[in-house]
């Protein structure tokens, strides 16, 4: 298994509260990604990082922010959680930007009530 | 606009009954096509990467092929443990994998 750990694995939170999800990797890969997965949709990119303190938006970035202060950690923050952000969140890592495969973590199931 | 369409949405097979899953794509500048397997409650697991039309890759009972418009994942003599959702993704010029919605495969003993 690729060395990717997501925490927490499950979380229930209330509307309007801030939430932070963590992705930790032991592979020293440069690229890290946050995706969300919802029924009827493929995995959709939220944000990604191409190095420490270097991040960029994906296709569904509204309401989310990210930070990467160390190569191994990539944090996803929901500033004020909404019910539409109930989803399963996956972190992925990639060795480089080229045509290399991405490896995924086990996911975090987030429920916003 | 980039599009990836997988069919069928769901497929039920008897053990040993071979079949194929389809991934059709419309993208500007394909740089790679990826197949993943996803089990319930888990993250996607990488299977194959295909880069150019005519390329084929095999792993156990799975074989992936690529044309200019679509990719097929052929499953030969499937077993119940092959039951999973199979995801297709494309890499274009952007730094992203664009995913289809998957095919949910059930293999009945």
Image (spheres, coloured by chain):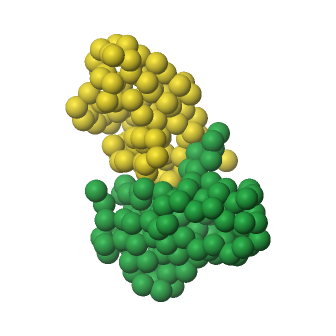
Chain colours: A green, B yellow
Between A65 and B62, the one lying in front of the other is A65
Q: In this orientation, does residue B88 appear?
A: yes
Question: In percent of the image, x 40 and y 72: which residue is there?
Answer: A24
Q: In this orientation, does residue B96 appear?
A: no
x and y percentages locating residue A41 in the rendered image: 63, 44
**In the image: residue A24, left or right of residue A66:** left
| Vertical arrangement, residue B97 with respect to residue A31, above or below | above
x and y percentages locating residue B16 in the rendered image: 30, 14
Question: In percent of the image, x 44 and y 65: which residue is there?
Answer: A6
Between B109 and B24, the one lying in front of the other is B109
Between A16 and B85, the one lying in front of the other is A16
x and y percentages locating residue A16 in the rendered image: 77, 71
Question: In percent of the image, x 58 and y 35: which residue is there?
Answer: B5
| Vertical arrangement, residue B108 with respect to residue A6, above or below | above
| Vertical arrangement, residue B96 with respect to residue A75, above or below | above
Quarter placement of the N terminus of chain A? bottom left
């Amino acid at each position: 298994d690729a060395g990717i750990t997501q925490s927490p694995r499950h979380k229930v939170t209330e509307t309007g509260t801030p939430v932070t999800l963590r992705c930790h990797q032991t592979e020293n890969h440069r690229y890290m990604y946050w995706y969300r997965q919802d029924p009827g949709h493929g995995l959709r990119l939220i944000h990604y990082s191409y190095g420490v303190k270097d991040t960029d938006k994906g296709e569904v970035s509204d309401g989310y922010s990210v930070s990467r202060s160390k190569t191994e950690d990539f944090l996803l923050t929901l500033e004020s959680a909404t019910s539409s952000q109930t989803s399963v969140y996956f972190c992925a890592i990639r060795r480089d930007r080229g045509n290399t495969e991405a490896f995924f973590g086990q996911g975090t199931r987030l429920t916003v009530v | 606009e980039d599009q990836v369409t997988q069919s069928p949405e769901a497929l039920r097979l008897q053990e040993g009954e071979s079949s194929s899953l389809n991934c059709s794509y419309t993208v500007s500048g394909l740089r790679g096509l990826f197949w993943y397997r996803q089990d319930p409650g888990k993250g996607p697991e990488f299977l194959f990467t295909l880069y150019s039309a005519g390329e084929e890759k095999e792993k156990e009972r799975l074989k992936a092929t690529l044309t200019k418009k679509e990719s097929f994942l052929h499953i030969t003599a499937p077993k119940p443990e092959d039951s999973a959702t199979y995801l297709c993704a494309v890499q274009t010029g952007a730094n992203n994998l664009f995913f289809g919605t998957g095919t949910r495969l059930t293999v009945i003993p």
